Image (cartoon, rainbow, N blue to C red):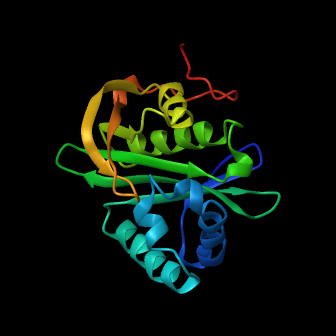
Amino acid sequence: MNEMKFDNYTVRLIEKDDLKNYYELIDRNRKRLEDFFAGTVALTKTLKDTKHHLADVVAKIKLKINYPFVVTDDTTGMIIASIQVKGVDWMVPKAELGYYIDAAYEGKGITTRATSLIIAYAFDELKLNKLYIRTHKENMPSVRIAEKNGFVLEGIIRSDYKTTSGTLVDLLYYGLLKEEFNPTDKNGEVGNM
C-alpha cells in the first residue's frame, strides 16, 4: 500500500520500526485514551510491552484482519494519530473503524481527513461493503468525524463496552455503505452536503 498524503501529513500502515514513535503517542495521551482504548493502553505500558503489541498488530495486517494506519506530521516526523480498520469480516464484507489523535492536534480536522482517505482505501482497495464506528455518546469529536464522513447513526448498542474502570456503557453505532461514501474535501466536509 502506498502512502496517502494531505497538507503536511502522511497516512500509512504502521510498521515495526514505528515502535518508539508509536509508544510516545500513546504515552503522551495515556490518560485520555484509558477508557475507550483500554486494550491498547494496557498492552503498551512499557516500551518492551509495546514491542510485543506492535509485532502482534503488524502480524494481523498479513492475516488481513486488521489494517492499522498511522498519521505522521511531515514537519516533525512524529506519529500523531492512529486509525484502524479492524475486525474485518470478509463474509459480509465489513469492518470497524477506530481512531484517536494526539491531544495537541485535536480539533484541526486531521482525523476527519485522514479517515476519509482510509475509508476510500477500505472500499476501493479492500473491497469492503460496510464500515462502522462504535463510539460513546459523550465523545463528540468522534461523533463529528463519523458524521462528517457520511456515517449514519444506526442505533445504540446497550452495555456494549467495559471501560478501564469496569463500567459498562452504551455505544452509538454508526454505519456507512460503500455506495453512500463521498470523500471529504479540503475543509473536512463531506462532498454533496
Q: Is residue 15 above or below residue 119?
A: below
Left/right placement of residue 112 relative to residue 73 reads left
Q: Is residue 57 above or below residue 35?
A: below
Q: Position of residue 115 (x, y in %)?
A: 53, 42
**Image quadrant where residue 77 sits:** bottom right
Furthest residue in direction bottom, as rendered: 48
Can residue 41 be seen here? The reply is yes
Left/right placement of residue 189 relative to residue 166 reads right
Furthest residue in direction top, as rendered: 193
Quadrant including the C terminus: top right
**Image quadrant where residue 26 sits:** bottom right
Q: Is residue 55 above or below residue 176?
A: below
Q: Is residue 118 above or below residue 17?
A: above
**Image quadrant where residue 189 sits:** top right
Left/right placement of residue 71 relative to residue 35 reads right
Q: Nearer the viewer, residue 82 or 183?
A: 82
Q: Position of residue 14 (x, y in %)?
A: 54, 66
- For the point 46% across and 45% down, the residue is 121
- For the point 46% across and 54% down, the residue is 35
- For the point 55% across and 50% down, the residue is 100
Furthest residue in direction right, as rendered: 75
Q: Position of residue 173 (x, y in %)?
A: 33, 34
Q: Nearer the viewer, residue 147 or 61?
A: 147
Can residue 1 be seen here? The reply is no
Left/right placement of residue 101 relative to residue 160 reads right
Q: Position of residue 53 (x, y in %)?
A: 44, 76
Q: Nearer the viewer, residue 145 or 4?
A: 145
